[in-house]
Amino acid sequence: MNLPNKLTVLRILMVPLYLVLFMWPFPCHYLLALLVFIAASLTDLFDGKIAREQHLVTNLGKFLDPIADKVLTTAAFVGILAAAGGGFAWIWMWCLMLILTREFVVATIRMMAASGGEVVAADQWGKVKTVMQYVVIIYMLVLLELGSWGIDWLSGVLQIGLVIGMLLMIVTTVATVISGYRYVVQNWHFMKEDE
């Protein structure tokens, strides 16, 4: 349990705090949830950086890091769907379903690889889709916080902001699906029967 792995576990432990702040309606609760989400996202940046620079990459880290990412982003996306879906809820729902399907497929391949004694780390596309998901989540949390202020002149701006958020979510979903497809193609040999 080296420092990068401790940071990864910390990211997982921050998820319940994020959800409490997100769901509990008090002044600036979206802002506090946003700050917790950003702090958790930074642990994702630092755990990998420290692990590579100090040669602390472990199989446990390769296993835990993607799980921590998925727990954090899934919690955030489900909350955003509930709070900001509105007229676009069906689009958010389909995007979330595709994102989660990709994660289940990748997790299944990882488990099959692990059963053979191998650990499969995320590739560059996986890292890109994670960053894109973080950007969409942070953007939507900012909109939710601004919307909670109840300022009349902001309402029109926020409506445009929600449309932009939906478009960002669609682009992010496409990147997520592409990364999942590449992951399946590159690791298909784990799915084959033993000869």
Image: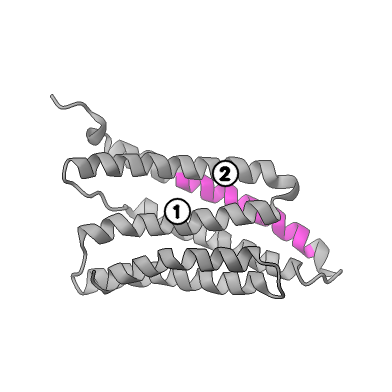
Q: Is residue 105 left or right of residue 62?
A: right
Instruction: For residue 138, say whether it is visible.
Output: no
Reading the image, the residue beneath label 1 is 129
Residue located at (38% from left, 51% from top) = 125
User: Residue at position x 41%, y 41% from top?
Assistant: 104
Closer to the chain start, of discs 1 and 2, is: 2
Give the residue at x 28% y 55%: 63
Magenta-colored segment: predominant secondary structure: helix
Which residue is situated farthest in the top direction here?
A: 195
Numbered marks: total: 2
Residue position marked by numbered label 2 in the rendering: 95
Q: Is residue 102 placed above or below 1 in the rendered structure? A: above
Q: Are marks 1 and 2 in contact (CB under 8 Å)?
A: no
Kindly indicate the quadrant of the structure image that contains residue 50.
bottom left
Q: Quadrant of the N terminus?
A: bottom left
Q: Position of residue 169 (x, y in %)?
A: 58, 51
**What is the three-letter code of the residue carrying label 1?**
Lys
The kind of residue tagged 2 is Cys
**Local crowd size for mark 2, using a 10 Å CA cut-off: few (<14), some (14–19), many (≥20):** many
Answer above or below: position of 42 versus 168.
Answer: below
Q: Up-down: is 183 above or below 65? A: above
The magenta span reads 157-176
Residue 134 in magenta stretch: no
Task: Residue 162: say if magenta.
Answer: yes
Quadrant the C terminus occupies: top left
Residue 61 is at least partly visible in this image: yes
